[in-house]
Every structure is written in structure tokens, then in C-alpha cells.
């Protein structure tokens, strides 16, 4: 073996060790949560190895508790996140298409309005949105949880920027072929913008999945529509002294999404990567 | 579907279009697999939504009332049991018990009034009552039947009574009355040969010093003699045992920064700063006193009767004692909660009936014995067997010395004004005198004048 | 003829554009634009003690500019702005830096690269509240694993206070948890951009004798600039909205910092401060706070718009 090859190999081993250490560090909280979740009551804080007997006792206790139906909360979260992300992606791409390829009255005015609201802290909307949702009778409904957040201005900007790069010639030739507006949108614009649409979908999915405050506000405590973060906060209030149970509950809220992510990671990561490099 | 082909042709005919050049079949399959799993999840979720809807079918012949409570697990199970007993005695009624986290229950309740999703009965902190009454959010109860205030523990019922034009009005019934006492870990006491709990603050300090030990030999204690909270409510036991007055007689000035007040707070601060027998449990991100007590880190804490059953359930060997005596003897703080009937409640007469049932001697005896708590109805005592519940007897004893909280429109305002400075004093950032002077000033400027 | 056909085309275009815009604009005007105006009205009112709780919004007392005047003198508000800026400085550069480093490392041909990619990205999908709770456990004084590890290597400063109770480390502690949670997201974006840089560019640099550092500065970073910009905007929005991590970890404490003559919470970000006002039902005051924040963010947005405009 020549020197160059050995150097290459050493470099590789070095890199691998660095990456492994980094991965362990980054996932450490996650592993620690699992570790505490299988410890015996009263040992949650101690740096020892006194385990619960049987090992998954805490998990069973959390799953069987009557006040917090975790499976139900999980399904609610999934439904809200998916439909919210779908609607956002659809509405944003439709709006972005209009901005990118159409001239219409008040275009500049509306664009300026959108731009100026881009960075308003979400908290500002809370009181008025809450008042509106109340007036619409949307308390304790999926509508109330999803719709106020589907106008994602940032997503619209991302999509508009991409759609502007689609050649106009494509659209006009489709028009000559007799395609109507919706067909042009559906069969030309959408397929060509799919990576960005996926990015918007995923960003909204993550946002909705972890959205805590709004779901807490639009649901009464007896609501059957509560999502996982809210459920977990309620659980935390009740069990704040039993960290082993709390960590088991946390695991319940994290593991399904981790599994889902690992199953879909190719899809996930491809969407993000493809979306990001486009300019 | 003809146009779909057209669109496709357009794209493939135009070579300018950027396309991804990965193996498409492979990619497509991978993506599709992802989709299948994803929608599998979604489809699996359908039955859940379906069963949610089913429960909404309503039987109009049943009179249903909704009660929001903020109890812990053990108390929750008991109130549900009481509701079932009531339903059996009163056919045609249904009491739906719903739990709200204690933290933030006030804003949650106010929010629910705005949205018209408020319950019929709510359990609220005693300090929240003035606002509910002034804003006309709760119903006066004597219009539904008579209430004899002499049946109740005075400290508990008084927060519900208003005198309006010489007429006594009652806006709620107490469901719980609490105060703090000293809880200690018997096992740790035995290990150090301590047989009886401390009686004075001087004893207490000696005990705490003895109980603060380093068990793993790293030169730092990992068992602490004492652990405490920073909040005003948790500081009242210190103030009260030192005989500190909060407001001047006419209620216009805050006189917390008196000599006695400084001494009391100084002692609390010294436990952490000077003697280092307190674990710093009051700090941001620290392990709370009751959590550390359950986990065997803290030997003594101040807490209330609501923790007794929980501690017992995990098999903790603990004792309860009176709060150590200061210059003004032993004393404690007063906490508690009331049940109120909200303005827009359905079937207020049934709500009232249930509250009467809940506070009746028999039910109070049942509640107090099971949960080792203080009954709010003084007639409950004859139905109780104290030999099996020595803890309650102690709390009865402790509550006799309790000093009521200052009566202001917003007790939370007092907490908000005081807590940052109590924290700063404990952390040594401010001297005790500076902290108390500022607290008194802030309270005078912000709370005592507010309308 | 020609003019009228252009007119019909124009009308058609307008109709089509508004049809496409309709769903977005409907939601936008109802739930985003209207609240901004409504907030202005709210900010001139006050919920008083006797306000009918069943009808708060129509029973508020008109107070004119009182809320704004009080706000200008509110040291807690100004402090929350300072802390928010500090939080943004702590989180944004480090998230970007860590993401970029990871992406460069993972750009090498190594066994198990996709496994690492997943491992690093996984924390981004985890619930923020849960992550916050776990880190609180890791940071806790006397018993948390982190202070204990630091103690075993001879650094015992955190044993008594933990990480979150010291004003110097509380916010960095929160930021660290959030940086580690968010870096994987940046990593994925950077990775894709780096993979899109033609190898020939680097080869040419090799021929010119550029070292790894020079390649990073002169080739990689300029080419991933759009991603950096994207992450800066996302990070700014996240800092201005930061609430959950504070709620889960410190609740605004520790209260030991002195600023404008008042004791301040070391981690009381503006998002959390706003929540406290909302929770106390000070709707008018909360609206005034958010209006001042709006003015500030408007300035930031305009700068961003400039930057984004330059990119085109």
C-alpha cells in the first residue's frame, strides 16, 4: 500500500469517529429520555442503573392511563399536520402561480401587503384569531386548528421565486394547444415545482406537528381533538413529580414520528434537498 | 384525461426543462412506498375520528352538567366516584367531570367564558374569586337554597362571602382548604439518629445541617436537609412565624419591609446562601421540592395535604410536623379552592344541589379520610376516625394557626410583583432589605391603586 | 379590434389570477390582515376588573394611547427585546455553522453516510416541548447529568445552580438545546447545495494549490449563500416567535438581571413576554406590545426584501 492510500484510510476513520461522536451527542437527549423511561420510580434523577421491573412498566402505566388517550392524540396530530400541510402547499402554489405568471390589478399593492406581514410575530395574531375562531364557532374543531395557519406567506414567496424561472414559452404553447388555466397549473406548473411544493409541505407539516400554543388555545380541556404536544403538557402538569412516567409519555409522543420519519426519510430529505438548491 | 398526455408531451419535448436524472423507476418506487406507509397511517386513524363523533348523540331527558376541576390524580378519582354516587341518588342527572391543569386554570376559564365553552361548575383558587364576583361571572348561591356558614371551616367559607348593602351574599362553596406543614423523610432522620421533628427554626437549622450530606464522596452534598420554593405563597410560612404584617390597617400601604419582615426573609435566604442546607430547589430548571422529596434527595420540605396520598402510594416513609416555631410561634399560609356556579350555567339548581352534596358532612368525611385532607365541613369530624389518619389531625392543628392572605383584588398581582425580587434576594443579587423595599413599593404603586 | 381583444385577454387574466389567489387571499385577509387592524383597535382598549368576562372584546374600556405610553416606560418589554436579539445571535449563526460543518463532513464518500444523515436530521422532527423537558432534566443542579459530567472533569461551577439558573448560561443553555435540534435541518439543505457544486470547480482549485480552508471560503460558502439567507430568515422568525422552549425550560427565569432599575428574567424573550400578558388577559397591552414588535419586524422585513431582491 502506498502512503496516499493509508492517508486516505486514516482520514476516513478519523471522519467516521468524528461523525459518530457528533451523532451520539446530538441524539443524546433522545437516548437519555429512553433510559429514564425504563428506570424505577424514585430513581429518575439518580445516576444509577436501578431499572423498573418489568422493564416497560412505565410505558404500560402511561398507555393504560384513562385521562390521556395517547393514541387518539397522535392520530389528531397526524391529521392536523397532514391536512394543514396539504392545504398550505395547495393554496400557496396557486397564489404563487398568479404572482409569478399573471398581471392583475393591485398586484403590487397585495404583494407589498404580504411582504410587510411576513415577519409579524405569530403571537400578535393570537388574540384576534382567537376572537374570530370563537365567532365562527370553530372552537374544538379541526377547522379551527388548521385553517388560520394555511396562508403561509413565506411558502408563497419560495414558490413564486421558483415559478418565475419556468419559461413563459411553455405556458403559451400549452395555451395554443387549448389547455385552460387550471390544466396549465396542474400539468405544467405543479410538476415542475414539485420539489419546492414538497419543501413547503414538509415545513408546514413540521410546524403543525409541533404547534403547541394555538392548539392549546382553540381546544377546551375536554376536547377530543387535542394534539400530542398539548396532551403531553397536560400530562406534565399532572405527573411533574414522576419523571420516569413523564419520560415514558415523551417517548410515546416522539417514537411514532421518529419511526414515520425513518420510513419516509428518503422522501423527506429528497424533498428538502431538491427544494433548497433551486434558485 | 387527454390533456394530461398533452402536458406530459410538452415537458418531454422540451429539452430546456431541468429534470432530475436519478433512476426514475427506483425513485418512484421508493417514494410510492413512502406514500403507502403514510396513507396507511392516515387510514388507520379513521376509526378514531369515527368514535369521536359517536359520543355526541345527546339524550335530552338527562340533565347534564359539566364540572371543571384541577385536582391531582388521586383527588380526580375520588371526585369522579362522588359524582357517580350523586347521579345514583338523583336519577336523570349526569355530572361530567373534566380535568384542567392547575397551572393556568384561571386564564383557561376566562377564555372559555369568551368562547361560550365554559363549564357549569368550576373549581377555582380562592384568590380568583374577587375578580369573578366583580365581573358578574358567577352566580349568587343562596337564591337556590339556604347555606349555613357556621357549618364550614371559617377560613374556607369566608373567601366566598360578600356583604352587599348589609345583605350576606355567597358566591361559592369551598371544596378544599389547605396550608403547608413540614414533611420529613423518616429514613433519613433515622440514619442520623433524629427521633422527633424540629420544633423551632433553630432546631430546624441544626437538623438541616445534620441532614445535608455527601453520600458519594465527591466532596459535594447530594442529599439536602431542606428544599423550598421561591414564591410569595411559599414564603408566607416564614413571614407568619415571624409575625410579619403585610398591609397597613387601612389597606393602603404595604409594610412587608418591616424589621420582622427583613428578619424572616433573611432567615429563608440564609438557609441557602449562608448555611447551604437548602438545595436551591427554587431556581429555574431545578428539581422541585416535592419531586426531590419523592426521589430521596431532600430530607425536609414544606408542602400541603394534597401530596400525602401521592407520597404514600410510592411507598415513601415520611412524617408530618408543624412548621417550626419562630418569634410568633408556629403558623402557616392559607390556600384552598372554591366551587363556583358560572353565570350561564345550565341547570343551576342541580349545580347547587351537587355542591351541597359535595360539602355535606358525610361526603367530606369520605373525601378527607381517603385522601388524608382537611374536611371543609366542620361536622365531618364526627364521621371520621383519626386514629387511622394521624396526618389530618396534624393539619387540623396547623390550620388553627394559619394567617389569611392579604385581601386584595388581585392576589396574582402580589405574586407577580414579589416573585422576581424574592428570587433576586435568594440568589444574593439583592439584599433582603432592597428586595422587600422594592416589593412594597411595587405593590403600592401597581396593586393597591388598581381598579 | 386589437384593443378589445387585448382587453378581453386582460380581463381573463385578471379573473384567472384572482381565482387562483382566492383561497390564499381569503385566508390571508381573514386570519392575517384583519387581525393586524383588529389589534390596532384592541391596543387602544383595556380589560378592566369589571369587564364582562363573557363578552370581553366588546366590553373593553377605551384608553387611547395609554397602553403605548405605559409600554415605552416598561423596562420588561425593552429587556425582552434585548434578550430576543441575543437569542437570535446565539441560535442563528451556530445553527448555520454546525449545519454547514456537518454537511461538509458528510459530503465525503463514507460507509453509512445515509445513516448519519438520518441521525442528524432526526432531532428536527422531535417535539420542541419534549426536547425542552429532556434538556431541563439534563441541566438540573446537583443531579443533572451535564453538571455531573462537568464536575467530574473538574469544573464544578454548575453543580449548585445547574445550567438554567445562572443568568450567564441560562439563555445559551436554551440556545444549545435548540441549535442541536435544528442543525440537522440546515445540514440537509447545505448538503444538497454542496453536492450540486460541480467537482471540476474543486479540481481546478486543487490545481491552483488552494487548501481546504480557502476552498471553503472562496467556493463553498459563496455557492451556498442562498441557503444561508434562507436559514437566517427562518431563524429570525423562530426567534421572534420563540415561546415553547422557554415555556418548557425556564419560564422566563432566572430573575437576577438588573436592567433599567428593575429585576428582569434572563430568558424572558419577547414571545414569552407577550404570552404572559395574554395569559393575564391584558389583551390591550398585548396588542400594543405586538404592534411595536410589528414596527421592528417591518424594518427587518424590508432589509430582507432588499437582500432577497438582490438575489434575483
Image (cartoon, coloured by chain):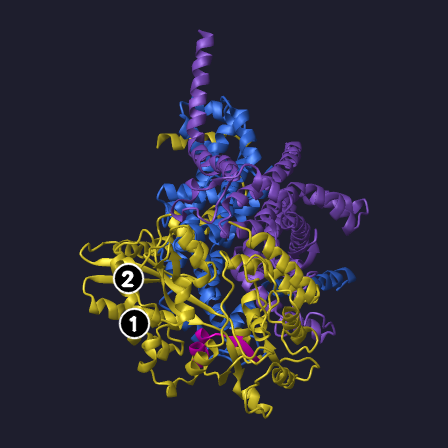
- Residue A159: x and y in percent read 53, 36
Q: Write down the chain letter for disc 2.
A: B
- Whether C275 is among the magenta residues is no
In this rendering, position of residue B148 left or right of residue C294: left
Circle 1 sits on which residue?
Answer: B360
Asked if residue A41 is positioned above or below residue B165 in the image, the reply reads below
Circle 2 sits on which residue?
Answer: B352
The kind of secondary structure element at disc 2 is helix
In this rendering, position of residue C257 left or right of residue C246: right
Asked if residue C248 is positioned above or below residue C186 in the image, the reply reads below
Q: Write down the chain letter for disc 1.
A: B
Q: Mark 2 to mark 1: distance in Å?
A: 12 Å
Q: Are marks 2 and 1 in contact (CB under 8 Å)?
A: no
In this rendering, position of residue C204 left or right of residue B199: right
State which region is magenta. Answer: B299-312
Instruction: Work out which quarter of the rendered image holds the C terminus of chain A and state it.
Output: top right
Q: Name the residue: 49% across, 78% down.
A: A40
The kind of secondary structure element at disc 1 is loop
Q: Which chain is displayed in yellow in the rendered image?
A: B
Amino acid at each position: 500500500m502506498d502512503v496516499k492510500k493509508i492517508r486516505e484510510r486514516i482520514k476516513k476513520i478519523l471522519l467516521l469517529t468524528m461523525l459518530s461522536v457528533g451523532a451520539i451527542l446530538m441524539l443524546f437527549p433522545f437516548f437519555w429520555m429512553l433510559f429514564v423511561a425504563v428506570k424505577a420510580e424514585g430513581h429518575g434523577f439518580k445516576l444509577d442503573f436501578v431499572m423498573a421491573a418489568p422493564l416497560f412498566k412505565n410505558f404500560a402505566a402511561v398507555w393504560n392511563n384513562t385521562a390521556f388517550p395517547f393514541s387518539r392524540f397522535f392520530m389528531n396530530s397526524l391529521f392536523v399536520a397532514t391536512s394543514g400541510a396539504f392545504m398550505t402547499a395547495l393554496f400557496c402554489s396557486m397564489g404563487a402561480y398568479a404572482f409569478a405568471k399573471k398581471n392583475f390589478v393591485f398586484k403590487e399593492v397585495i404583494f407589498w401587503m404580504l411582504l410587510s406581514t411576513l415577519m409579524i410575530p405569530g403571537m400578535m395574531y393570537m388574540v384576534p384569531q382567537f376572537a374570530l375562531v370563537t365567532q365562527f364557532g370553530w372552537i374544538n374543531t379541526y377547522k379551527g386548528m388548521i385553517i388560520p395557519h394555511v396562508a403561509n406567506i413565506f411558502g408563497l414567496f419560495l414558490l413564486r421565486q421558483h415559478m418565475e424561472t419556468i419559461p413563459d414559452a411553455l405556458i403559451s404553447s400549452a395555451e395554443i394547444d387549448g389547455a385552460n388555466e387550471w390544466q396549465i397549473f396542474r400539468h405544467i406548473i405543479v410538476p415542475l415545482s414539485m420539489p419546492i411544493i414538497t419543501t413547503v409541505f414538509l415545513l408546514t407539516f413540521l410546524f403543525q406537528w409541533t404547534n403547541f400554543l394555538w392548539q392549546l388555545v382553540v381546544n377546551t380541556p375536554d376536547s377530543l381533538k387535542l394534539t400530542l404536544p398539548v396532551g403531553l403538557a397536560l400530562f406534565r402538569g399532572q405527573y411533574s413529580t414522576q419523571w420516569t412516567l413523564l419520560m415514558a409519555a415523551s417517548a410515546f409522543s416522539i417514537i411514532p414520528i421518529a419511526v414515520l420519519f425513518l420510513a419516509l426519510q428518503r422522501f423527506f430529505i429528497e424533498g428538502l434537498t431538491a427544494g433548497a438548491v433551486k434558485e | 384525461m387527454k390533456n394530461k398526455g398533452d402536458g406530459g408531451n410538452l415537458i418531454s419535448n422540451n429539452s430546456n426543462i431541468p429534470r432530475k436524472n436519478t433512476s426514475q423507476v427506483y425513485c418512484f418506487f421508493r417514494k410510492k412506498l413512502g406514500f403507502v406507509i403514510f396513507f396507511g397511517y392516515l387510514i388507520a386513524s379513521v376509526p378514531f375520528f369515527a368514535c369521536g363523533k359517536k359520543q355526541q348523540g345527546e339524550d335530552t331527558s338527562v340533565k347534564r352538567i359539566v364540572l371543571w376541576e384541577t385536582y391531582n390524580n388521586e383527588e380526580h378519582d375520588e371526585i369522579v366516584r362522588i359524582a357517580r354516587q350523586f347521579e345514583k341518588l338523583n336519577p336523570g342527572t349526569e355530572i361530567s367531570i373534566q380535568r384542567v391543569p392547575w397551572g393556568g386554570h384561571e386564564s383557561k376559564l376566562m377564555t372559555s367564558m369568551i368562547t361560550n365553552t365554559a363549564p357549569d361548575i368550576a373549581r377555582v383558587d380562592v384568590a380568583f374569586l374577587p375578580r369573578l364576583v366583580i365581573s358578574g361571572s358567577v352566580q349568587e348561591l343562596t337564591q337556590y337554597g339556604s347555606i349555613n356558614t357556621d357549618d364550614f371551616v371559617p377560613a374556607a367559607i369566608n373567601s366566598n362571602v360578600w356583604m352587599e348593602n348589609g345583605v350576606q351574599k355567597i358566591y361559592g362553596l369551598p371544596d378544599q382548604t389547605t396550608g403547608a406543614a413540614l414533611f420529613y423523610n423518616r429514613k433519613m432522620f433515622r440514619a442520623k439518629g433524629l427521633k422527633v421533628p424540629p420544633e423551632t427554626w433553630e432546631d430546624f437549622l441544626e437538623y438541616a445541617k445534620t441532614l445535608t450530606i455527601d453520600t458519594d464522596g465527591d466532596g459535594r452534598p447530594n442529599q439536602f436537609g431542606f428544599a423550598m420554593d421561591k414564591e410569595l405563597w411559599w414564603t408566607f410560612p416564614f413571614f407568619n412565624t415571624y409575625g410579619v404584617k403585610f398591609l397597613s390597617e387601612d389597606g393602603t400601604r404595604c409594610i412587608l419591609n418591616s424589621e420582622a419582615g427583613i428578619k424572616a426573609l433573611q432567615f429563608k435566604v440564609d438557609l441557602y446562601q449562608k448555611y447551604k442546607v437548602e438545595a436551591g430547589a427554587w431556581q429555574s430548571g431545578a428539581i422541585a421540592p416535592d419531586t426531590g422529596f419523592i426521589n430521596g434527595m431532600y430530607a425536609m420540605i414544606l408542602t400541603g395535604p394534597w401530596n400525602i396520598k401521592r407520597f404514600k402510594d410510592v411507598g415513601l416513609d415520611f412524617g408530618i410536623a408543624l412548621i417550626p416555631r419562630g418569634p410568633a410561634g408556629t403558623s402557616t399560609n392559607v390556600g384552598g379552592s372554591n366551587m363556583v356556579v358560572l353565570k350561564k350555567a345550565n341547570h343551576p339548581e342541580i349545580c347547587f344541589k351537587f355542591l351541597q352534596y359535595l360539602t355535606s358532612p358525610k361526603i367530606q368525611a369520605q373525601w378527607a379520610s381517603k385522601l388524608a385532607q382537611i374536611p371543609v365541613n366542620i361536622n365531618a369530624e364526627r364521621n371520621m376516625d383519626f386514629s387511622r389518619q394521624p396526618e389530618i389531625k396534624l393539619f387540623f392543628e396547623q390550620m388553627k394557626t394559619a394567617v389569611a392572605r392579604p385581601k386584595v383584588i388581585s392576589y396574582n398581582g402580589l405574586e407577580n410583583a414579589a416573585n422576581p425580587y424574592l428570587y433576586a434576594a435568594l440568589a444574593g443579587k439583592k439584599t433582603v432589605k432592597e428586595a422587600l423595599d422594592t416589593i412594597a413599593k411595587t405593590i403600592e404603586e401597581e396593586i393597591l391603586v388598581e381598579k | 379590434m386589437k384593443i378589445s381583444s387585448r382587453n378581453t385577454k386582460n380581463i381573463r387574466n385578471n379573473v384567472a389570477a384572482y381565482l387562483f389567489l382566492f383561497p390564499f387571499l381569503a385566508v390571508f385577509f381573514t386570519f392575517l390582515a384583519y387581525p393586524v387592524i383588529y389589534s390596532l383597535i384592541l391596543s387602544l382598549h383595556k380589560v378592566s376588573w369589571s369587564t364582562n368576562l363573557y363578552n370581553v372584546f366588546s366590553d373593553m374600556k377605551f384608553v387611547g394611547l395609554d397602553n403605548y405610553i405605559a409600554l415605552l416606560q416598561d423596562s420588561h418589554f425593552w429587556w425582552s427585546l434585548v434578550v430576543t436579539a441575543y437569542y437570535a445571535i446565539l441560535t442563528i449563526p451556530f445553527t448555520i455553522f454546525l449545519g454547514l460543518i456537518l454537511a461538509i463532513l458528510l459530503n465525503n464518500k463514507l460507509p453509512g453516510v445515509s445513516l448519519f444523515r438520518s441521525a442528524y436530521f432526526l432531532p428536527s422532527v422531535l417535539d420542541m416541548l419534549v426536547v425542552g423537558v429532556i434538556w431541563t432534566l439534563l441541566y438540573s443542579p446537583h443531579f443533572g447529568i451535564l453538571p455531573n459530567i462537568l464536575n467530574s472533569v473538574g469544573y464544578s461551577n454548575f453543580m449548585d445552580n445547574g445550567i438554567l439558573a445562572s443568568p450567564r448560561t441560562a439563555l445559551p443553555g436554551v440556545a444549545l438545546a435548540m441549535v442541536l435540534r435544528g442543525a440537522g435541518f440546515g445540514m440537509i439543505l447545505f448538503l444538497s447545495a454542496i453536492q450540486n457544486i460541480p467537482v471540476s470547480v474543486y479540481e481546478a482549485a486543487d490545481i491552483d494549490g488552494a487548501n481546504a480552508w480557502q476552498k471553503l471560503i472562496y467556493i463553498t460558502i459563496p455557492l451556498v449563500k442562498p441557503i444561508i439567507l434562507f436559514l437566517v430568515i427562518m431563524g429570525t422568525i423562530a426567534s421572534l416567535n420563540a415561546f415553547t422552549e422557554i415555556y418548557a425550560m425556564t419560564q422566563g427565569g432566572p430573575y437576577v438581571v438588573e436592567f433599567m432599575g428593575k429585576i428582569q428574567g434572563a430568558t424572558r424573550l419577547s414571545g414569552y413576554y407577550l404570552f404572559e400578558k395574554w395569559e393575564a388577559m391584558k389583551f390591550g397591552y398585548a396588542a400594543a406590545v405586538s404592534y411595536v414588535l410589528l414596527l421592528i419586524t417591518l424594518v427587518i422585513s424590508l432589509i430582507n426584501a432588499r437582500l432577497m431582491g438582490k438575489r434575483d
